[in-house]
Image: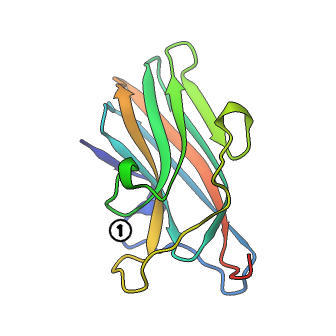
Amino acid sequence: MTTFTCAVALPGVQPRRSAYGGVQVEFFSHAATGSTAANDVILGCKIPNKATVLDVGVRLSTKANEQTASVFLAKAGDGSASAIAVMASVSISSSTVSSFVRAGAGSAALTWVPTKISLSDDAAVQYAMLKVGISAGSTTTSFSLNGWVSYTMDEAR
Protein backbone atom coordinates (compact mmCIF):
# COMPACT_ATOMS: atom_id res chain seq x y z
CA MET A 1 0.00 0.00 0.00
CA THR A 2 1.34 3.39 -1.02
CA THR A 3 0.10 6.74 0.28
CA PHE A 4 0.24 9.79 -1.99
CA THR A 5 -0.24 13.18 -0.36
CA CYS A 6 -1.46 16.48 -1.81
CA ALA A 7 0.48 19.54 -0.59
CA VAL A 8 -2.38 20.81 1.62
CA ALA A 9 -2.52 17.43 3.41
CA LEU A 10 1.19 17.23 4.29
CA PRO A 11 2.24 16.91 7.94
CA GLY A 12 2.72 20.35 9.47
CA VAL A 13 0.08 21.98 7.26
CA GLN A 14 -2.85 23.01 9.43
CA PRO A 15 -6.42 22.92 8.11
CA ARG A 16 -7.78 26.40 7.48
CA ARG A 17 -10.53 27.75 9.66
CA SER A 18 -12.08 31.17 9.55
CA ALA A 19 -12.57 32.91 12.87
CA TYR A 20 -15.45 34.87 11.35
CA GLY A 21 -17.63 32.01 10.12
CA GLY A 22 -18.42 32.13 6.43
CA VAL A 23 -17.42 29.52 3.88
CA GLN A 24 -13.86 28.25 3.54
CA VAL A 25 -12.79 26.56 0.28
CA GLU A 26 -9.79 24.24 0.28
CA PHE A 27 -8.32 23.31 -3.11
CA PHE A 28 -6.04 20.32 -3.60
CA SER A 29 -4.15 18.65 -6.43
CA HIS A 30 -1.60 15.93 -6.95
CA ALA A 31 -0.03 14.59 -10.11
CA ALA A 32 2.54 11.84 -10.31
CA THR A 33 4.34 9.73 -12.79
CA GLY A 34 4.45 6.18 -11.58
CA SER A 35 1.87 3.61 -10.69
CA THR A 36 -1.06 3.20 -8.33
CA ALA A 37 -2.68 -0.07 -7.39
CA ALA A 38 -5.43 -1.51 -5.20
CA ASN A 39 -5.21 -0.37 -1.55
CA ASP A 40 -3.25 2.80 -2.38
CA VAL A 41 -4.57 6.00 -0.80
CA ILE A 42 -4.38 9.63 -1.94
CA LEU A 43 -4.77 12.20 0.85
CA GLY A 44 -6.59 15.24 -0.55
CA CYS A 45 -6.90 17.84 2.22
CA LYS A 46 -7.54 18.39 5.92
CA ILE A 47 -10.89 19.59 7.28
CA PRO A 48 -10.98 20.97 10.84
CA ASN A 49 -13.02 19.47 13.66
CA LYS A 50 -16.50 21.01 13.99
CA ALA A 51 -16.56 22.05 10.32
CA THR A 52 -19.70 21.40 8.27
CA VAL A 53 -18.81 20.17 4.78
CA LEU A 54 -21.02 21.91 2.22
CA ASP A 55 -19.66 20.83 -1.16
CA VAL A 56 -17.03 18.51 -2.62
CA GLY A 57 -15.70 18.13 -6.15
CA VAL A 58 -13.07 15.56 -7.13
CA ARG A 59 -11.54 14.68 -10.51
CA LEU A 60 -9.39 11.58 -10.79
CA SER A 61 -7.54 10.96 -14.06
CA THR A 62 -5.26 8.18 -15.23
CA LYS A 63 -3.48 7.60 -18.49
CA ALA A 64 -5.26 4.82 -20.39
CA ASN A 65 -5.79 2.46 -17.46
CA GLU A 66 -8.82 1.05 -15.66
CA GLN A 67 -9.29 1.89 -12.02
CA THR A 68 -12.01 2.04 -9.36
CA ALA A 69 -11.68 4.37 -6.38
CA SER A 70 -13.70 5.41 -3.35
CA VAL A 71 -13.86 9.07 -2.28
CA PHE A 72 -14.52 9.53 1.45
CA LEU A 73 -14.05 11.65 4.59
CA ALA A 74 -12.24 9.94 7.47
CA LYS A 75 -10.14 10.60 10.53
CA ALA A 76 -6.38 10.54 9.99
CA GLY A 77 -5.28 6.91 9.87
CA ASP A 78 -8.77 5.52 9.16
CA GLY A 79 -9.80 3.82 5.95
CA SER A 80 -13.09 3.78 4.08
CA ALA A 81 -14.51 1.04 6.34
CA SER A 82 -14.56 3.49 9.28
CA ALA A 83 -15.23 6.63 7.24
CA ILE A 84 -17.21 9.59 8.54
CA ALA A 85 -18.94 9.73 5.15
CA VAL A 86 -18.43 7.93 1.83
CA MET A 87 -18.86 10.23 -1.15
CA ALA A 88 -18.93 7.93 -4.16
CA SER A 89 -17.28 5.19 -6.10
CA VAL A 90 -15.38 6.45 -9.14
CA SER A 91 -14.71 4.18 -12.13
CA ILE A 92 -12.24 5.05 -14.83
CA SER A 93 -11.77 2.96 -17.96
CA SER A 94 -9.22 3.14 -20.73
CA SER A 95 -11.80 4.97 -22.84
CA THR A 96 -12.80 7.61 -20.23
CA VAL A 97 -9.43 8.14 -18.47
CA SER A 98 -11.00 10.78 -16.19
CA SER A 99 -13.94 10.94 -13.81
CA PHE A 100 -15.44 13.88 -11.93
CA VAL A 101 -17.66 13.55 -8.84
CA ARG A 102 -19.49 16.47 -7.24
CA ALA A 103 -22.07 16.93 -4.51
CA GLY A 104 -25.60 16.72 -5.91
CA ALA A 105 -24.51 15.84 -9.46
CA GLY A 106 -26.31 13.08 -11.34
CA SER A 107 -25.81 9.46 -10.37
CA ALA A 108 -22.90 10.40 -8.10
CA ALA A 109 -25.16 12.63 -5.98
CA LEU A 110 -24.11 12.86 -2.37
CA THR A 111 -26.76 12.03 0.16
CA TRP A 112 -24.59 13.10 3.11
CA VAL A 113 -23.90 16.78 2.31
CA PRO A 114 -23.76 18.78 4.50
CA THR A 115 -21.76 16.64 6.90
CA LYS A 116 -20.55 17.81 10.29
CA ILE A 117 -17.03 16.75 11.30
CA SER A 118 -17.36 15.75 14.92
CA LEU A 119 -14.29 14.35 16.63
CA SER A 120 -13.70 13.86 20.33
CA ASP A 121 -12.40 17.05 21.96
CA ASP A 122 -9.59 15.08 23.59
CA ALA A 123 -8.47 13.44 20.32
CA ALA A 124 -4.82 14.13 19.49
CA VAL A 125 -5.68 14.91 15.85
CA GLN A 126 -8.37 17.58 15.47
CA TYR A 127 -9.15 17.26 11.77
CA ALA A 128 -10.60 14.83 9.23
CA MET A 129 -9.24 14.24 5.74
CA LEU A 130 -10.72 13.89 2.29
CA LYS A 131 -9.23 10.66 0.96
CA VAL A 132 -9.35 8.69 -2.28
CA GLY A 133 -8.82 4.97 -1.82
CA ILE A 134 -7.95 2.90 -4.87
CA SER A 135 -10.11 -0.22 -4.59
CA ALA A 136 -9.31 -2.02 -7.85
CA GLY A 137 -7.20 -1.72 -10.98
CA SER A 138 -3.84 -0.10 -11.49
CA THR A 139 -2.07 2.62 -13.41
CA THR A 140 1.30 2.12 -14.99
CA THR A 141 2.27 5.55 -16.25
CA SER A 142 0.69 8.50 -14.41
CA PHE A 143 -2.33 9.79 -12.52
CA SER A 144 -3.69 13.08 -11.25
CA LEU A 145 -6.19 14.13 -8.61
CA ASN A 146 -7.63 17.60 -8.11
CA GLY A 147 -10.66 19.14 -6.50
CA TRP A 148 -12.06 21.18 -3.67
CA VAL A 149 -13.92 20.96 -0.38
CA SER A 150 -16.02 23.85 0.90
CA TYR A 151 -17.02 24.02 4.55
CA THR A 152 -18.16 26.43 7.21
CA MET A 153 -17.17 26.77 10.85
CA ASP A 154 -20.45 28.53 11.62
CA GLU A 155 -21.88 26.72 14.66
CA ALA A 156 -25.40 27.92 13.83
CA ARG A 157 -25.61 25.75 10.66
Q: Hey, what amino acid is under mark 1? A: Pro
Q: In this view, does 149 lie above or below 127?
A: above
Q: In this picture, is 13 found above or below 53?
A: below
Residue where numbered disc 1 is placed = 11
Q: Residue furthest left?
A: 1
Which quadrant holds the C terminus?
Answer: bottom right
Q: Where is residue 12 in the image (x, y as percent from the top left)?
A: 38, 73
**Colouring:** rainbow
| Picture coordinates of residue 70, whole percent (x, y) | 46, 39
User: Whole-percent x and y of residue 140?
Assistant: 33, 23
Decide: few, some or many residues near mark 1? Use Cα within 10 Å; few <14, some 14-19, many ≥20. few
Residue 150 place in picture, x, y as percent: 67, 61
- Between residue 1 and residue 78, name the one nearer to us: 78
Q: Which of 80 and 99 is in front in this view?
A: 80
In front of the other: 11 or 58: 58
Q: In which quarter of the image is residue 75?
A: bottom left
Q: What residue is shown at x 65% (from left), y 36% (from top)?
A: 108
At 33% from the left edge and 80% from the top edge, which residue is drawn?
Answer: 124
